């Protein structure tokens, strides 16, 4: 039976979700594999493991429960090892590095922030800031929409201006939030966002970080900002 791995913690961790239901249908009970000063949270791996919502939620729930009691190095969904002995061997081989990272992540969580433009609001801003674009738009309107070439030219100019705003607003978001965080890294790959950043935040400063997000929303209402967290520090686990 192959072994599914949820995460790694210090052996002195006080809140290990042993016997909690993990991935699989029926859910496989979570157990620990110990080696030296480390333990791995594992369960038997189902043969038909797929990224189904049920299993994704089970994976995250195990890590959330463990993370509430101390630092955990979270594995991404789908981490499977040949057996418990292979897990134990990995803990022994990389133990020093795991312990160092656990110490660095103690008392910290991850927030993933995604931002996009409210298209109508940004278009209004772009036109209000450029007399030239306003004049081109007004000329097209008076000409019944303008020729194909005129429409194309205006569209290209507006698209370029919006792209510049995206770059400026990505920097604005980063600067607005980095003061309440300890580290930041690019978030998981996704499309449709002008910014996708993950921040490592001390639990003691989580309220401050969330307040900084709310201030950003008020000061930049043309941004649509999504907040995911607090999460296990996936993006800061090597």
Image (cartoon, grey):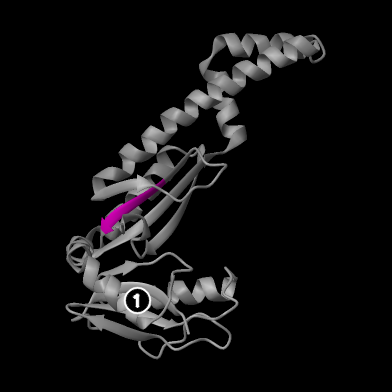
Judged left or right of residue 108, residue 82 is right
Placement of 143 over or under 110, stated as above or below: above
Q: Which residue is mark 1?
A: 86
The residue that appears at 56% across and 20% down in the rendered structure is 160
Q: Position of residue 206 (x, y in %)?
A: 29, 59
Placement of 61 over or under 118, stated as above or below: below
Query: Image quarter for residue 125?
Result: top right
The residue that appears at 37% across and 63% down in the rendered structure is 230
Q: Position of residue 20 (x, y in %)?
A: 42, 87
Asked whether residue 189 appears in the rendered view, the answer is: yes
Q: Position of residue 211 (x, y in %)?
A: 33, 52
Quarter of the picture holding the C terminus: bottom left
Q: Is residue 156 magenta?
A: no
Between residue 39 and residue 17, name the one nearer to us: 39
Judged left or right of residue 226, residue 180 is left
Between residue 53 and residue 155, name the one nearer to us: 53
Query: Image quarter for residue 18?
Result: bottom left
Placement of 172 over or under 38, stated as above or below: above
> Magenta residues?
197-201
Judged left or right of residue 62, residue 16 is left
């Amino acid at each position: 039976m192959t072994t599914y791995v949820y995460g790694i913690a210090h052996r002195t961790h006080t809140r290990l979700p042993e016997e909690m239901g993990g991935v699989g249908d029926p859910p496989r009970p979570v157990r620990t594999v110990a080696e030296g000063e480390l333990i791995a949270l594992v369960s038997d791996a189902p043969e038909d493991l797929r990224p189904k919502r049920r299993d994704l939620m089970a994976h995250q729930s195990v890590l959330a429960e463990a993370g509430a009691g101390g630092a955990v190095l979270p594995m991404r969904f789908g981490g499977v090892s040949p057996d418990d002995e292979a897990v134990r061997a990995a803990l022994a081989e990389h133990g020093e590095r795991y312990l160092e990272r656990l110490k660095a992540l103690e008392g910290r969580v991850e927030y993933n922030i995604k931002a996009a433009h409210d298209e109508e609001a940004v278009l209004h801003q772009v036109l209000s800031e450029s007399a030239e674009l306003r004049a081109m738009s007004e000329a097209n309107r008076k000409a019944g929409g303008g020729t194909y070439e005129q429409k194309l030219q205006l569209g290209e100019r507006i698209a370029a201006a919006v792209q510049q705003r995206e770059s400026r607003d990505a920097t604005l978001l980063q600067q607005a939030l980095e003061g309440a965080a300890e580290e930041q890294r690019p978030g998981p790959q996704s499309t449709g966002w002008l910014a996708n950043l993950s921040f490592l935040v001390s639990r003691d400063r989580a309220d401050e970080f969330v307040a900084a997000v709310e201030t950003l929303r008020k000061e930049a209402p043309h941004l649509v900002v999504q907040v995911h967290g607090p999460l296990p520090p996936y993006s800061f686990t090597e």
